[in-house]
Amino acid sequence: MVDGKPGNDTRNAAGRWTKIILVLSLAMNLFVIALVVGASFGHHRWHRPHSGVSDVGVGLFTEVLTRRDRAALRDAFLAAAPDFREQRRAAQDDFTDLAEALRQDPLDLALVDTLVARHGTRIAERIDLGRRLLSERIGQMSASERADFADRIDARLKRGRRR
């Protein structure tokens, strides 16, 4: 220490570790978001052409809906979110901006936080819309359709436990 000020080595080490911890924390948050989104959207992307239903964010439910119910849910989603394609483009732009921000030195953590928060808000809005639309669709089902739906949920859960 010279004149009561910490040495450059101490300051640089502390700053470096702070940046590393912040980046690791961000990476973990993005990883968790990716897991949730992947679990919600992933199944249908591999098993059938992308129809937009998986973007509603209702996960397992879309797997066990009938083809007719999925089509109705997709149509309701597109009607309720006509700007969906623009939102997707904006999300891609945010990811591009995030990648750029992560490469900056010094790190602008406020910008990173804003971009991650904006993405999280978009996901939450889609999930809320999907939940509302799914609830409405279930409300339109007859008692026998709901029972069949419940049976498909049970069957899917049993299949998942054996994996």
Image (cartoon, grey):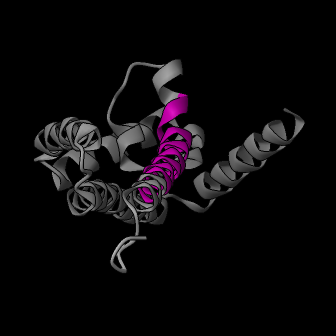
User: Percent position (x, y) of residue 75?
Assistant: 26, 43
Question: Considering depth in this image, is 148 or 162 the residue closer to the camera?
Answer: 162
Residue ID at (44%, 57%): 22
Residue extending furthest right?
162
**Quadrant including the C terminus:** top right
Q: Quadrant of residue 132?
A: bottom left
User: Percent position (x, y) of residue 32?
Assistant: 54, 50
Rendered view: 88 above or below 4: above
Residue extending furthest bottom?
4
Residue ID at (37%, 71%): 2
Rendered view: 59 above or below 113: above
Span of residues in magenta: 18-43
- Residue 99 part of the magenta segment: no
Q: In which quarter of the image is residue 156?
A: top right
Question: Considering depth in this image, is 10 or 36 the residue closer to the camera?
Answer: 10
Is residue 150 left or right of 155 when viewed as pictured? Answer: left
Residue ID at (40%, 58%): 15
Residue extending furthest front?
3
Is residue 37 left or right of 51 when viewed as pictured? Answer: right
- Residue 34 part of the magenta segment: yes
Question: Considering depth in this image, is 113 or 117 the residue closer to the camera?
Answer: 113
Is residue 31 left or right of 118 when viewed as pictured? Answer: right
User: Percent position (x, y) of residue 84?
Assistant: 17, 44
User: Percent position (x, y) of residue 96?
Assistant: 20, 35
**Quadrant including the N terminus:** bottom left
Looking at the rendered structure, the number of numbered marks drawn on it comes to 0
